[in-house]
Each structure stands twice: as structure tokens, then as C-alpha cells.
Amino acid sequence: MESTRNRLIELLETSDKQFVSGQLLSEKLKISRSAIWKHMKELEKDGYHVEGVSRKGYRIVKFPDKVSENTIQWGLRTDWLGKKIIHKTSTKTTQQIAHQAAQDNAEHGTIIIADEQTKGKGRMNRQWQSTKGKGIWMSIILRPDFLPVMAPQLTLLSATVLADAIAEHTALTPKIKWPNDILINEKKTAGILTEMQAEQDQIQYVVIGIGINVNQITEDFDKDIQDKATSLQIQTGHQWNIKDFIQHVLQSFENSYDSFMQNGFPDVKYKWESYGYRIGEYIKIKTLHKEWKAKFLGIAEDGALLTKTDNDEIKKIYSGEIEW
Ligand code: BT5
């Protein structure tokens, strides 16, 4: 039943807005015309708007707002990103599914997306809270043809994509806090986790994990992060259509990635710095043995944070705790 239904959606979807005759559907799916009609009624119950016109056939005029492989793909204007989508209603983490899929040869641009993650991952084994149906929890598999040392540039690029998508879609003013936090009004609304499988001089694949808080209210976050996390809904006072926003992010991602591959890193650096949080201000850097203040200048090509000390020494910072 489920697979016939998916095939039916697929047939209607690939015909785009054209009608598909009942005759053709019944031949392809090997079911009677009245069975097709029953399937259409079921689709309507799920939020699809199907138009049926005698002598012409059927066509989908609107997909439901909920997220699924079909609803994301319908109207997605990308060439390679999201051509293959794996959607889960609930999973531990989309990163794990992405790694598995990549090892099973999933193609460049495959995305894994979930309504809910029960063990969402942040960096360094931290947790990422992923409330059901309230945000975008997605992993993108990429197979870039460059050296592993360049992978951090993809994290920086992803941050600019999210900042752009939020700014364009909602008219809010996001900031990127080094290395990968997207802030709105000083609170975190999105995060990025880049993981990679590589040999010394070759990347096998990269998984870019993207988490964006969309429709949470403050109480949806655990108490310990309520004062530092935010969502588009909290910031704008209304709900956002998650499927539309996913499509926007994917389209922006593909454009930026393609232009990065053609033109290299300078445009990404420029854009990143235009969103950079506290550029030009003093920050405090703490390592195990030392603590010092320096001016935050921007980012280096390798993803490091560029600073200038009071005796005009330019220093790249790769790790350590930063106090902003
Ligand atoms: C990140 O880590 O910001 C990376 C987040 C990546 C999440 C995506 S969702 C799809 C894919 N699948 C996954 O399992 N992960 C990726 P980090 O910079 O380490 O930030 C983690 C810290 O942010 C936590 O320790 C909390 O303090 C805070 N935090 C947790 N959940 C949050 C949320 N939903 N919104 C804002 N802050 C959060």
C-alpha cells in the first residue's frame, strides 16, 4: 500500500503540473482506476491538494506542509543538492545515517533530514537539542575534490549560507560567532557540525550537519540553555514553514558551494566577515597555561581566528577558550 502510494506521488510529481491520465496511472501501478481514486482521497486526507478532471486525469496542485522526501523535492530548484533525500520522523542523529549512507556510496549532495533527533550531536561530544517538528535537523553529504586541510572552509561557507538564508527569509540580522554559531540578538539559533572521512591527501566524503531552531518557544529548550538559545519563532513572533525554509537553505547552499568551487575562498571570507560577531573588538583567549587579550581581526583561509595583540603581532588562533 505504502509503496504504491509513493509510486503514485512520484508519478504525479515527475509530471510536474501536467495532468496524468487515470489510464496511465492504472497501467503503471497495476491497480484499477477505482483503486487510484481511493488513493487520491487518502492523499487529500494527508494534506495533498489533488485536482481530478475527467478526460484529463490527475495532478497535484499543492503538497502538504509537513516534511517528507516528496514535499522537499517538489519545487526545489537545485541541480545536484537534495536529488536524493532520506527523511526520518525520528532518529538518534542524522550524522550517523549520513556516515553510513556515504560509506554505502551515497552520491554527492545526498541529504538526510529528521523531524526529531533523540541524540543530536554538537561538537566535542556536546548535545544538540532537536525538538520534534520545530527545527531543521539535516546532514549533507559532500564529495569535494580537494585536500582535507581545506575542509574547515566548508564549515565557514556553511555558516555564511545559514546567515544568508536567515537574513533573506526572515529579514532578521544574524551574526556568525567563530567558528560556527549563528546568533540572533546574541542568542544561538543555529549550529554546524562538520565531520570528514579522509586519507592524507584525499577526502572521501564530508558530512555537514546543520541544526536550525525554527519554531521553538523558550520552554521547548532545556532550562540550561533557555537563556542562550533562540529560534526564528521567538525572534519574529510567528511560526515559519519548515519545508519552505529547508528549500531556501538548500538553494543557497548549492549556489554558494558552486561559486566557492569556481572562485575559491575569498568571497566566503568576505561574506563571513560581513556577518562576523565582534570583529574589531577585543576578546580574551585562554589556553591551559596562558590567558591574554587581543583584537579580533577576522578569519584566515584555514578557518583560524585572526587576532592582533597590543604589540601588533598577528596571531592565528586554532583552539582555546574564547571569551567574547
Ligand atoms: C553545534 O555544536 O553547534 C553543532 C550543532 C549541529 C547540529 C546538527 S543537527 C543535524 C546534525 N545531526 C546532529 O546530530 N548534529 C547536526 P556546538 O558548537 O558544540 O554547540 C553545542 C552547544 O549548544 C550545547 O552544548 C548547548 O550549550 C547548545 N545547544 C544545544 N542544543 C541547542 C539548540 N537547539 N539551540 C541552541 N543551542 C543549543
Image: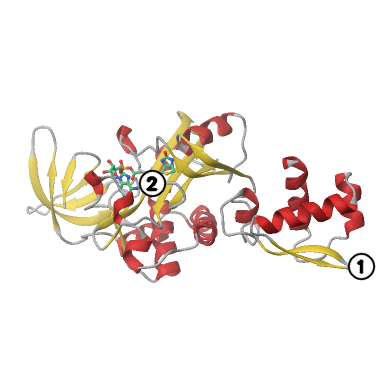
Q: Which mark is on residue 109?
A: none
Q: Is residue 144 visible?
A: no
Q: Assess disc 1: are there few (<14), some (14-19) or many (≥20) residues with their C-alpha within 10 Å of its C-alpha.
A: few
Q: Earlier in the sequence, mark 1 or mark 2?
A: 1
Front one among 97 and 102 = 97
Front one among 89 and 70 = 89
Residue at the spot 49% in from the left edge and 60% down from the top edge:
245
Numbered disc in front, either 1 or 2: 1
Q: Residue at label 1?
A: 55
Label 2 C-beta lies within 8 Å of the nearest ligand 1 atom:
yes
Q: Position of residue 258 (x, y in %)?
A: 54, 55
Q: Is residue 147 left or right of residue 8?
A: left
Residue type at numbered disc 2: Ile
Dot 1 lies on which element?
A: loop
Front one among 159 and 35 = 35
Q: Position of residue 181 (x, y in %)?
A: 31, 51
Residue type at numbered disc 1: Arg
Residue at the spot 57% in from the left edge and 29% down from the top edge:
103
Identify the image quadrant of the N terminus: top right
Q: Which mark is on residue 192?
A: 2
Label 1 C-beta lies within 8 Å of the nearest ligand 1 atom:
no
Q: Position of residue 235 (x, y in %)?
A: 32, 65
Q: Position of residue 19 (x, y in %)?
A: 82, 65
Dot 2 lies on which element?
A: strand
Q: Residue furthest bottom?
A: 171
Quadrant observed for ligand 1 in the rendered image: top left
- On screen, 104 above or below 279? above
